[in-house]
Amino acid sequence: MDAFSGVPTSKVCHAETQKFTLTAPLASSALYKGYGISLHKYNIETFLTDDQTGISKKFRAIFISNIEGNSLADKCGRLQIGDRILATNDRFTMNGATEEANRIIKNTKDSIILLVEFDVIEAPLSLSRMLSVKLVKKR
C-alpha cells in the first residue's frame, strides 16, 4: 500500500481511492504465478476528479471480477471483488480498456501499481450517539 485519499462527506456512501503496490517474486522463480486478479469491464460509469484542476471526468470502469486464493492480490488483504481499477502502473484505464490493463498486468513481472476505487458505507450515528457495527468475515 502506498497512498490513500478519501474525503469524508455527509453522504452515507462515498468512493475512496487507494494505491496498492503488489511485488512478485522474481519471474525466474518457480513461485511466480502472476498477481492473481482477473479484470472485467462493466457498462457502469464512474467519475474521476483531477486533484489539480478539480474537474471530474466520466468513464467506464474496469472491475476486479476474481481474486485467486493465496495469490499476491489475496495476500494483500485489501483488494476486493467489485473494486474499480482506475490505473495500472500509472496508466489510466479510461473507458474500460480491459485488454490493455490485462496486458500490463500480465507483462509486469516485478511490481505492479494499482490505483483502486472502492465504495465506503458510513453508518450515521443515532441520536443516542451509539454506533452499531456488523462485521463481516472475509472468506
Image (cartoon, rainbow, N blue to C red):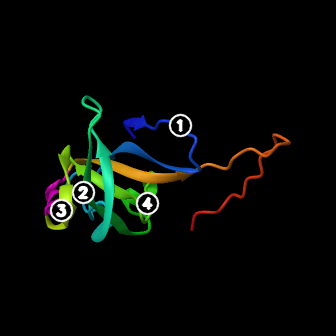
Q: Contact (CB < 8 A) between labels 2 and 1?
A: no
Name the residue: 44% across, 56% down: 75
Image check: 7 left or right of 32? right
Identity of the amino acid at label 2? Phe
Marks 2 and 1, Cα distance to the nearest angstrom?
A: 23 Å
Q: Secondary structure at mark 4?
A: helix
Identity of the amino acid at label 4? Asp
Foreground: disc 3 or disc 2: 2
Q: Secondary structure at mark 1?
A: loop
Q: Position of residue 62 (x, y in %)?
A: 28, 63
Q: Contact (CB < 8 A) between labels 3 and 4?
A: no
Q: Position of residue 28 (x, y in %)?
A: 17, 57
Mark found first going from the N terminus, 3 or 4: 4
Q: Which residue is mark 2?
A: 59
Q: Write down the region rendered in magenta.
A: 100-109
Name the residue: 30% across, 71% down: 42
Q: Which residue is mark 3?
A: 106
The quadrant where residue 59 appears: bottom left
The quadrant where residue 49 appears: top left
Magenta segment main secondary structure: helix
Identity of the amino acid at label 3? Lys
